Structures are given as C-alpha cells and as structure tokens.
Amino acid sequence: MNTNSEHHARELLQEAEQCWQKNLTHAKRLLEEALQVSLQLQNELLTADVLLLRSVVFADAREHENAERDARSALLTYKAQGSELQIAQALKAIATTYSYRSMFAESVEYCKQVLEIAERLNNTPLVIDMYARIGWDNHSQNIYAEALEYFNKALALAKEINDEMRIASCMADIAAVLTRTAKLEDAIVYLQNALAIYEKLDVQRGRMRCISDLALIYARLHDYATALQMNFQALEIAEKIQLTYSQAVAFTNIAVVYYNLFDLAQSVVYLKKALAIHELNNDPLGIATNLSNIVVIYTELKDYNDAIEFAERGLEISKKINSKDLIALNYANLSTVYVGVRNYNKALECAEESLRVHRELGYTVGVINSLINKGAVLQVLNKYSEAESCFTEVLPLLQEAQNIEAQTKVYLGLSTLFATKEWNKYNPEQSEAWLLDAEKINTNTVDRNDELYYKLSEFYEQKQEYNKALEYIKKANAIHNEVFSGETAKQVLTLRAERELAAKEKQRLIIENEREVARKDAEIYRLEKIELAARNKTIEEQNEQLHIKQQQLNISNNKLRQAIADLATLTASRKARTYFMMFMILLFVFSEVVVEPIIQFITSSVIVGMLLRFGIGLLFRPIEAFAEHLTTKKQREEILDTAKSA
C-alpha cells in the first residue's frame, strides 16, 4: 500500500512539473496533493522533492518567502540524506529567490556554490543554468559586458549538448542585453530564433517571453501599433496559462506604450490593472514597483497630491519588505514630485536619500540617476557649483553603464549650467559644446530625444541664430508628431477599438454564460422543488395514516386501561363478598352451639319469628354467593376479551 501511495505521489510530482510551464495554478494544486501524500507516508526525501519543485513554482508566482522557505526545507533534508545533485538543485532554487528579490550579491554567492558541485559532477545542464542566472544578475544591475559573457558561455554549452530549451532561453537572454545596449536589429534576430524553437516545442511561457520582448523593441523603434499588438498577444498567453504575474507585466508593458504615445490616461488605466493583479496576489514587490510607475504618470499629469500619496505608499511597502532598490526608486520619484510642487528642500532631501541607498547597493545606474536628480534640484536652488559636481561625478560612470539616455541628461544638465548667466562660470560656447555632444550620441540611436532638439532650438533662439533654432524646432516637432500621426495613429486607434470590442464581446459571453448557468440552476431548483413538494405530500399522507393509527391505538389503550380498572374493582368486590360469606357461615355454625339455649328460651316470644326468617336467609346465602361468583366470572372473561382485542 505504501508503495502504491509513493508511486501516486511521484506521478503527481511529474504531472506538476509537466504542467508548470503551462498552468501555474494547476501545478500548485498537484503539488499540494503530492505533499499531503508524502507527509502521510513520512517519506522525507519524497517530501523534499515536492517542496523543491513547489519552491520553483512559488518563485515564478513571486511568492518569494514561500519559495525560500520550501527550498531551505528541502536543502536540510538533502544535506542529511540526499545526493550532491539534490543539494545543488536546492541551492539553485534559493539563488533564484534572491535574484527575483533583487538581492543579486546573495544570488551570485549561491550560484557559485552550485557551479562548484555541477562542475565536479560534470553536469553540463546545471552549469548552463548557473551561467544564465549569473548573467541575468549582472544584466539586472546593468553590467552588460559581464552579462553578455555569461550568456554566451551558456549558449555555447547548450549547443554542445543540443538542448533546445536552453538554447532558446540563452538566445532570449542575449537579446535582452542587445536591446539594452541599443543593438535592436541583432536582438530581433535572436528573439525570432528563440521564438521559433519555443513554438516548435509548444512552450507557451517561452513564446510569451519572446513576444513580450519583441514588443519592447518595436516600441523603441516607434512602431507602437506592432508593439501594442504583441503585448496583447503576450497578455492572452499569460491569461491562457493562468500566470497572473505575467498578466501584470503585460499590462505594465501596454501602459508603457501608451505613455510613449502621450496617452497618459490610457496608460494609467493599464497600470492600475497591473496593480490590481499584484494586490490580488498579495505581491508587495509588484505593488511597490507598479505604484512607482503610476507616480511617474501622475507627476506628468501634474496631479501632485495623488503622486505623493502613491509614492509614499510605495515607499512604505518597500521599507516593509526591505527592498532597497525600490526604496531608492520611490525616494527618486518623491524628489521629482516635490520639484513639481516647488518644495525644493524636500526634493533635495529625497534625492540625497535615493543616492545614499544606491551607493549602499553599489548599483551604478541608480547612482547615476540619483546624481542627475540631485544636480537638477541643486540647479533650481541656485547651487550651481554643487550641481556641476554632481554632473561631473556621473561622467566616468557613464562609460560602464552604456546608458545613452542618462548620458544625454547629463550633457543637457551641464549645458544648462553653463548657459546660466547668474553663475560665475557662465560660458555659452561650453554650453553649446555639451548640446552638440548630446546631439552626436543621439544621432544613431533609435531613442530619439525630442527634448534635446527643443533645448537646441531654445539655445540658438537666445543666440538669435533663428535659422538653426527653426531647424531644431522642426526636428523636435517631427519626433513628437511622429508618434500619433498618419498610419501609426490609425493603426493604434483601430487596435484599441478592436481590443475594446473584443473585451466587450468577451464580457457579453461571460454574462450570457452566467445567465445560462443561472437558468440551469433555476431549472434544477424548479425540478427539485417539484420533487420536494411530491415528497412532502407523500410524507404528509403517511403522517395522516400514522395519526389515524395513533388515534386508534389511543382508543384501544383507553379501553385496556378501563378494562384493567374494572377488573380490579370486580376482583376487590368478589374478595369482600367471599370474606363476608365465610364470616356468616362461621357465625351460623357457632350460633348452633352458642345461642341454641337462648333460642329455646325465647321460642315463644315475638322475636322467634324474626330469628327464624334470619336463619332461613342464612341457609340461602351460599347459593346466592355461588350465583354471584358465576356472574362475576363471566364479567371478568368479557373484560379480558376486550383487553386482548385492544
């Protein structure tokens, strides 16, 4: 029996592993059932295997604490009685939980432990996974050169063993780095190759990832119609496989596209949809991240009160879960909002706090953005030299980060400083040089910056070089108008309309389905009600018959009780008469002896007649008593017959 139960648990575990990539919710249910069986069997190794897979599923669902708990529990069991490979798998799961929580140093530490075991066991798939994880940790910190190095090493090994799943995953990872470093054409090739493999293997989550990443690229290429279409396609896959976190990501990506289209209202709608999913999943990391995105929109809408409210809520959650990168991000957002309400001292305070946390994390991109924000606030406060120090501190960091957007902001900041007449270092030529450097680095990038051209236009207008000013204003307007003009605008609006119609149709079908279910429920209720009524009528008839029988029984019981009472009365009367007759016979006998002389003495008296009559009566008393006895016996038999019939 135990063997069969263990076999059943292993089957559940295998089924969960197979459906994990397609249906996270179902995988959870299967693992919970497998866990119950393994606990009943008191099989520690089987329980550890279930917990290990459940840890991976929890991590995908962004239930980080549950994921780490299960992974550590499995690790303890494996260390006590498992193999080195099992220990390595548990360490890998722990590394994943740290990586998902942006605790990259801790993640890399565990990855290196796993690598030592994997290389000792000559386990190439595990080595590939660890290279990919370390690569992703570097990528998440914007350390792109190291990230690309690890991803390429992983891809080479995957090709050696012809592991198609890992080949596709590594290609998608490499594409992510290429996208960040603006090598978009190469990124598209890698993603299309990965997508072809995932479609061949029917791996829905892989398809979803590739489609979502392609959407990001098309958004950067300003092909917003294609970007939206792909994001909606990714959303449909996420809904199909019931991966709610990915649904939230898709909503966020859609919001970003609408943000780029300057459709801030629509952007907020999708950000709030994403926020609702994170709240439903009780995912504080997702909630805090999404709140920070909403703050950006509200700041641009100049809805500063709501922006501050969302930013403070996001900051509170970030502190509660001790997510330092989100703490820094929310301080940065608050700094921008306080600039909007002209509370510059508070803005500076938040910018400095953001910078402090990013320095503590050693997060280069975060340090860069915080220094830029601080420099901008100091500039507004007329602290020009301190602002210059912030911008110049960023310059050497930009070479490591390879972030054109940040580099452009620094150049614009320095240009504005040197164009400030109140500053003792006022230098229009230097200001122009920084502007032209900014234009140069943006020439060959897809992320064209309309703000840069507006700045150039303003600069040349101040110099009264109106031809150049007009040239740059035209460039800025061209970028701005390109977003919502011509065929692109038509495609985006058509796509939105189609999406809204599809949503309404889906809602209509849901409502019709609910009505059909309600109708069926009502019909079932009606039939059950009829059946219940018939059943009740039968029960009532049976109760009526029982009532009649009960009445008959009560009558019989009453007759029986009366018969018993009568019998007792007759019996008592008969006994009294019998005792009296015995007394009279004794009296008669004794009278012959005792009163004979007296009778003889008074024979002639009047009393004699009376005594004689009395004596004759006594002679007849036994006969009378016998007759009474017969009558009483007959009555007694009748009473007993009545009692029996009752």
Image (cartoon, helix red, strand yellow):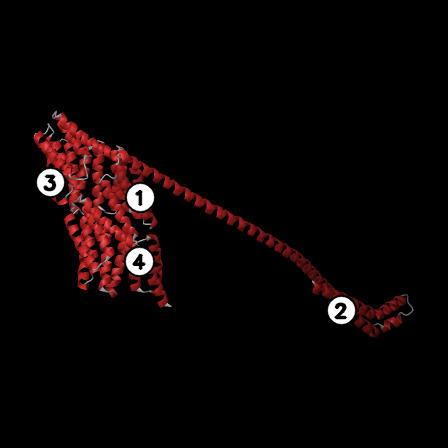
- Residue 111 locus on image (x, y percent): 19, 56
Q: CA distance from mark 2 to mark 4?
A: 103 Å
Q: Residue at x 12, y 33 (%)?
A: 435
According to the picture, the residue beneath numbered tag 4 turns out to be 17
- Residue 521 locus on image (x, y percent): 48, 48
Q: Is residue 493 above or below residue 45?
A: above
Q: Nearer the viewer, mark 1 or mark 2?
A: 1
- Residue 287 locus on image (x, y percent): 28, 44
Instruction: Say what amino acid the circle numbered 3 marks.
Output: Leu
Sequence-wise first label, 2 or 4: 4
Instruction: Say what amino acid the circle numbered 1 marks.
Output: Phe
Horizontally, residue 8 falls left or right of residue 597, namely left
Q: CA distance from mark 3 to mark 2?
A: 140 Å
Sequence-wise first label, 3 or 2: 3
Q: Quadrant of residue 444?
A: top left
Q: Nearer the viewer, mark 3 or mark 4?
A: 4
Depth check: give the residue in front, 290 or 641: 290
Image quarter where the N terminus lies is bottom left
Q: How many marks?
A: 4
Residue 232 is tagged as 1
Circle 1/circle 3 CB separation < 8 Å? no
Q: Quadrant of residue 255?
A: top left
According to the picture, the residue beneath numbered tag 2 turns out to be 579
Q: Nearer the viewer, mark 3 or mark 2?
A: 3
Sequence-wise first label, 4 or 1: 4
Q: Residue furthest bottom?
A: 593
